[in-house]
Amino acid sequence: MATLLEQVEVDTELGGGGGGPPPPGAGPPARGGGPPPACNPWALAARRLWRNRIAMAALLLFLVIVVMCLAAPLYADHVAHVNPFVPNLNGHTVVNGKVVPVMQRGGGILKLGETPIGPTWDPSHYFLGADSTGRDVAALLLYAGQSSLLIGIGSAVLCSLAATVIALIAGFFGGVTDSVASRIMDVIWAFPVILLAICIGTELLTHSNGFQFGPLHVDASSLWLPTLIIGFIYIPYVYRPVRGQVLSVVNKEFVEAATAQGAGNTRLIFSEILPNVVSTVIVLLPLIVATTILTESALSFLGVGVQPPNVSWGTLINDGTDLVYTRPWVTIAPGLMILLTVLSLNVLGDGVRDALDPRAKLRVEG
Amino acid sequence: MKLPNVETIAARRGARPLRMMSLGAAVAALAVTAAACGGSSGSSTTTPQTTGHKGGTFTILANSAFGVADPAQNYTLEEWQLLIDTHDGLVSFQKAGGAAGNKIVPDLATSVPVPTNGGKTYLFHIRKGIKFSNGQTLKPSDFVTTFERQFTVPGPTSFYSSIVGANKCSTKGCSLSKGVIANDSAYTLTINLTAPDPELMDQLALPFAMAVPASTSPKLTGNNVPPGTGPYMWKSYNPNTQAVLVRNPYFHVWNSAAQPAGYPNEIIEKYGLLVSDEVTQVLNGQANEVFDGDSIPSDQLSTLNSPKYSGQVHVNTLTADYYFALNTRRPPFNNPLARQAINYAANRTAYVKIYGGPSLAVPTCQILPPNYPSYTAYCPYTSGSNHTKWTGPDLTKAKQLVQQSHTAGMKVVVDSTNDQVGKAFAEQMVSDLNAIGYKASPQLLAASIQYPFVQNSSNSGKWNVGYSAWYQDYPAASDFLNVLLGCGTIHPNSDASPNIAAFCDKAIQSKIDQAETMGATNPSGAAALWTQVDHADTNAAPWVDMFNPKQIDVLSHNVHGYSWSPQWYILIDRLWLS
Amino acid sequence: MLTFIIRRMLWTVLVMFVITVLVFIIFFKTPGVDPARALAGRSPNPQTLAEIRAQLGLGRPFPIEYGIMMKKIFISRDLVSYSNQGVRVVQEVFAATPATLSLVFGATVLWVVLAIAVGIAAALLRGTVFDPLIMVVALIGVSAPVFWVGQIVNMLSQSALHDTFLFSWVPPLGYTPFLQSPELWFKGLVLPWITLSILYIGFYGRVLRANLLEVQNEDYVRTARAKGISERRVWLRHTLRTSMITFVSLFGLDFAVLVAGGALLTEVVFGIHGVGYLTWQALQNLDLPTIMATTIYGAFFIVLINALVDVAYAWLDPRIRPT
């Protein structure tokens, strides 16, 4: 029976077939000066990842972002001394030693409009300026990150889990199961999500005490809502490539070999096929997180994503679209955070893919 | 008149919700002083009548179209600003800026008649020799069809419900043979009412009552506008792209006060751009006007302040209220002390800033807006002792009242629209409520859902404070005080129940009823009564009234002849292009 | 192949049926939605509302109302919008289709070509500094929400830099039909094409790069090299083809969604009145007939394009049979 290592080597996309796997137990060629090769391929992959400096830098960036967002209450209470969830239209702050109003009236003869102050670059006084209701953008940015990360990662994970399970079943059993599953995916993909979000959102909002799903109580402004909706709609997106992968693996010799040895369906699916498919999912995962974070921002832009009093990077971008010409930082800051998060996840994802593929020629070596 | 159901991109983008035009009707009986009307804080409202020259195509940019075009149903400022150039009524508002724009002048009738029969009968002489844009000659019987369509086409019917026979009319059929009597040989039209109605002339000047040919279908004509008698005619209307108006070849001037010849040769209205892009295009000279019902986002407001554009931007006061209705059906706001408490605590400066600052909004506590009949400044809910003007909140008083009412700590749901401005209003109100001891939370709905939602009593258990706005239909105090706060406009379980607060006070209602009947016989007595009603309503605090808004007109540099009428706002065919 | 096509047709009909039923049910379950009120005009009296409700036959069982709406869409094609009763939705959707297709096809060509170039370049240059650099630049496009990018582009091209040589050629926002003026059609679409494609270039470039690198080490590639086939041919004929599987499957999904009106935010920001824009308006006004029409239009394309992708799978990897 082929070891896990060989399966990881032999597989990925289509192609392969042909030459047989290296003899069991051989392990990867030794690297100069390193400790003797471990037998556990996952540990090997982890070590490879650890040696990949760029990927580690990306991981660090991502962790820094996460920590910063978790530290939002600390920043708001102890550094900036604001409550960023309450409008502060009549407030004042200190810039260069002078007390200035947070909202400033327009100039000229007409004096139209009220413009919030721009970035002061002073961490204790409106570091990134104020938004259209006078709230501290920097503090909001960190709190918003908590929601965005939670929704982005949560929905990507749920989505990938569901899609993988369905793809395994559909690809393995083929035939009618596959057809039905694929058509259900078509329905999901073709469904007007925004309508669904509007309806669910409205339904929830008008139950001011939230919803009861049996023993579960879901509050109207709960973050579970956008998480589940977004996770749901991207299932087809993960399903298709994973199913393609499953289909190619299903036909490989080692599966046939396992069947010949008397393996039942469950063992075939979970021990033979799933491991070969996992790396596809892992590679896709950061891409899906990027997509879900962006989708959340789109839904929040439409008003059916995250609801007040919660904030997310998407609602911040939405709030700032009115100020794009005069106070671009109100939209640039959350956009930048999304970009850095997505970037770090993708670079990390690359590193993970490299680490999982021991036969890649020009792999970065530690 | 209320905000439309269409929620626009502008609204999404965080500007104000698309406003509906409020039609000011001229107040025939009550003179509004020149100082009061349309007074702006910016550029001119009226330019001297330098004669412009004819020619050119005038292009308006609007964020969205106005829905269906049939004038019997359409109730939008957007179409009305065009309909007044393509159609005429028995009477109309003078097409002039300033106070003159409030005056009712004869249009298709030769003169404004004095009613007889105790104020119930009006005899109009119809002008001869006027043709529709399809060449047909206007006859008095055309008006019969016009009025009957008001009832057979679904839409607002309350305006003409005092005509004899109207109560039997419905979308199934309508015969006003006793109420609107046309004599095609004598060229007269007689209107009989069931009771005197001092507001009739104003209502006859609305586009609902503008003449269409007798052959027009009693059913909705969809996006085809029936022919009219005005200087322009509708060439095409596609709500996804544009509307095009061209000159009516059969038009000649019969009363230049009512319907002058227009200057532009063609008027085009294009739909679908974001409002900030509309402003950019007009300032670039690629179009001539930003539709004045589109709310301008705050970063473009800063652009407009620049001295470069000072001749192109005009600001005018509107007779409208932006307010929060308090749900008087259930705690805590079934308790008048609690309602007064939030009125003392509401930070109107903040609401004004949300809307764009003191240049665009003026705080208010009472129901009637300034420059309106029966308006006398009154604001009890302010700090300090001057009760004619709001200067600041009084939190101490507010907290006291909360304690007295025993409602402290109660949960309050603030319902608003999910555009930028509605959201900000809700958040500020939540903050104001929390500051005096309530536990408030916001509830944001799409604008097209929110307005019917707060009107329908079956949703009453789900909200306590509901955002809304109201623009006048015509300047009669009843348009605010009776329509929005009268016992008769509470329709249970209906999406059309404009008394959102469900406020009904028997004593105040009897004053209202008295004022209504007095209106025809003793206008000044009625006016004084309406003022009392306004103040009594303000004391009972069914609302938290935030402010009265102003409106901005943005024009390209080559547009001249700007005038602002308090009824129709910008008069499009009076503008000329260089 | 024929059975495949027939089977797919049947499934298409079933999928569309299911979707339309779901849309119908969801719409009427949304609180605050009352078609009678939408049709009654503004500020109707309650009596008018009741009359209209009776006229519309509201309150009849769902299946009957559903059937009537389907008949009006497919057979008599006179379904009327709730927010504007002068508009026939089927005709409206057809009229809006050219704008969407112009936008989507142009952007697609741009993004596919550039993504392939980016993916190959990054894979070839792997190990050098260019690989991560290319990826970062591509990623920046992926990370920014399209409505934000579009507004920045508009701000620069219409306002701030409008008078410079960079952007003075940019016409006012909006779509000009090709037959009306090919030049304006093209000029008006250049910036929307770029904006829309930026989103996808980075994403697809990475996917392709990842697959290319995996496939590099497959036995058959090694065999091809051992046979002395030129590096370029190895890449184009042997490597690229099988790496395209993931690319193609994701592409199918994304392209389908865009054609179906998924580029709605781009259409809105650039004033292009395509199907996405219609969908957007309809959702805001809760205009069920238009929502239904655009959903059906979209569902049709999605199912169709998925079928084409399945055929493409089979061509790309003969071991996979279309199901």
Image: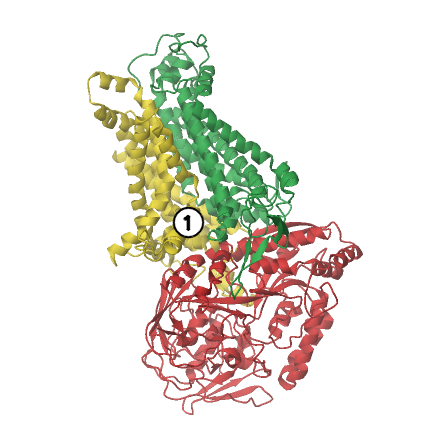
Chain colours: A green, B red, C yellow
Report crowding for label 1: few under 14, some 14 to 19, many 20 or more residues within 10 A (C-alpha). Answer: some
User: Is A145 located above or below residue B164 in the figure?
Assistant: above
| Left/right of residue A8 with respect to residue B454 in the rendered view | left
Q: Amino acid at mark 1?
A: Ile
Specify whether residue A269 is in view: no
Q: Residue furthest bottom?
A: B186
Quadrant for residue A163, please give it: top left
Indicate the quadrant where residue C16 lies: top left
Residue A282: x percent and y percent?
Answer: 44, 26
State the image coordinates of residue C270 (x, y, percent, origin top left): 38, 53
Dividing the image into 4 quarters, which one contains the C terminus of chain B?
Answer: bottom left
Side of B236 relative to A338 (left or right): left
In screen coordinates, is B575 left or right of A125?
A: left
Q: Position of residue A358 (x, y in %)?
A: 38, 17
- The chain carrying label 1 is C
Which residue ends up furthest to the right in the rendered image?
B404
Q: Nearer the viewer, residue B116 or A333?
A: A333
- Residue at mark 1: C152
C134 versus B373 height, above or below: above
Percent of width and height locating residue C124: 30, 26
> Can I make out residue B204 in this image?
yes
Residue that extends furthest to the front in the rendered view of this protein: A97
- The local secondary structure at tag 1 comes to helix
